[in-house]
Image (spheres, coloured by chain):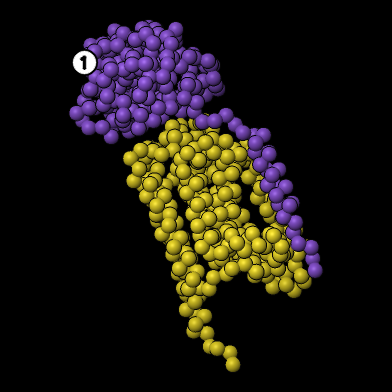
Chain colours: A purple, B yellow
Amino acid sequence: MRRAWPLCRTGALLAGLGLLAAACVPPTTGDAAEPSGSDDPVPEHPEGVETSAAEGWHGEWLDAPLERPDFTLTDTDGEPYTFAEETQGQIALLFFGFTHCPDICPAHLATISAALDRLPHSDTRHVEVVFVTVDPQRDTAERLEEYVGGIDERITALRGDLDEVIAAMDMVDLPPPAFDEPDEDGAYDVAHAAAILAFSDDGPARLAYPFGVRQEGWVQDLPRMVRGEEIAE
Amino acid sequence: MNFWCSATGEPWTWQWQPYLGVWAFLLAGLAAYGWAWRRLAPSAGEAEAHRWRVPWFVGGVAVLWVSLDWPVGQLGSGYLASVHMLQFLLITLVAVPMLLRGIPPWMARGLAPGGWRLRVLRGLTQPLVALLSFNAVILVTHAPIVANPLLQSELGSFVIDLAWLLGAAVFWLPVVGAHPDLPHLNRPLQMAYLFAQSILPTIPASFLTFADFPLYPVYELAPRLQDLRLDALTDQRAAGLLMKIIGGFLLWGRIAVTWFQWASADEEPVAT
């Protein structure tokens, strides 16, 4: 009679594999506060502005409200777009990103788009989503139009000279983008703040939405903003 | 070096990546099978008589390899809930029954000859216990509160895959009857057992299909696959439909095979 297969060896094998796995645990998915783009350290939130948990909201409370910035850039039709004027009386979600962004920008925009799909027109008609490219060199008007068209045609995409974009970011205390060195194909990554600033219909932004806010969070928060609910720490 | 496929938050790329743990796991399985074949066969004749089982085992390992390794393993762990469900179906409803079919009775008896091992296995493979255990594994490993954190580490992802393997082995043992000393259902009861299993996952599948929002942040916030414009909720609904329809199709396929085997056995002339 042959000897039976010792199950303790199976256990030892599995335990060994488990320990090996434990030794190889990688960083976890999408830290909500991680900036988009390259590895350069770009702060997620507006510079010098403290944020804290906003009671009952999915965004983060801006301790000092940000005034609606008065910048003018160009939309995908080549027409000038003055942010403060065009979004006056609207809930404005302002996001700076770039179309070659491999991870956070498309997921952020797709999440908002999915949330808008879930809300009634009576709410969404009061919401303006504005995406400003921080990479105007590659993001031509045509590319921007194709990009946002592929996600949601309700998103307004803007571009301008890099200096104009940086000036617009400075108005909301966001740090300028940081560009990686191009590789042999000319491709490069751009680090930029990943928060979406939510401006209320009467002017200032009280909330910043970091990456990680889910569809359900937007679906709950946007109607409250439309109703003008008070945002408090 | 990657050990096991897991969610990394990195953009998806079609560039091949090695997962050494997957290879080590599968090679260890093949090596153990080869070792058991040589060491546990009571005679050369017995080994020869069961040689037809080898392709079943190797085929099961091949299905496991496809399910666990890049690209299916990586897509399923960190990008698409529908691919995660495909992995689940391949592992639990295809690979495991093939692996068990590849084990001759003398090998099964050699692995669990008696004592506490056999007692534990006998308890677990009581059909009702096996059915409930497997469905408990399904519920727990698909619960967002469990799956989401586990999928974000290689060890956690490994634990999910291992739970599927073990849960499915317990479920299939009463059907495949790999071990002569464990409960083995007759064919009508096998069909009833498999039918029950084709119904029970309707509950988790319905949660996935009819949820108002994506349930798994790991898939909802994953970097999008640029070539595939699939939003997170549609992907999740596809996962639910796969669980119900493809899972049901596989189980009903097996029921059909069992029915034909039963019918043809009835028609065989009785030896006198």
Q: Is residue A80 visible?
A: no
- Residue A20 position (above or below residue A184): below
Residue furthest out toward the left: A122
- From the viewer's perspective, tell me whether residue A85 is left or right of residue A220: left
- Residue B144 position (above or below residue A78): below
| Residue situated in front as seen by the camera: A208 or A61 | A61
Residue B183 percent location from the top left of the image: 59, 68
Residue furthest out toward the bottom: B272
SS at badge 1: loop
Residue A139 percent location from the top left of the image: 38, 20
Residue A194: name its quadrant.
top left
- From the viewer's perspective, tell me whether residue A144 is left or right of residue B261: left
Q: Chain of mark 1?
A: A
Residue under label 1, please give it.
Answer: A89
Determine the residue positioned at 69% across, 60% down: B116
Residue type at mark 1: give it. Answer: Gly
Quarter of the figure with the C terminus of chain B? bottom right
- Residue B200 position (above or below residue B47): above
Residue A179 percent location from the top left of the image: 49, 15
Residue A34 percent location from the top left of the image: 49, 22
Q: Is residue A194 visible?
A: yes
Q: Count residues near mark 1 (Cα–Cα under 10 Å), then give few for <14, some for 14-19, many for 20+.
A: some
Determine the residue positioned at 49% across, 28% down: A30
| Residue situated in front as seen by the camera: A187 or B172 | B172
Residue B196: name its quadrant.
bottom left
| Residue situated in front as seen by the camera: B2 or B203 | B203
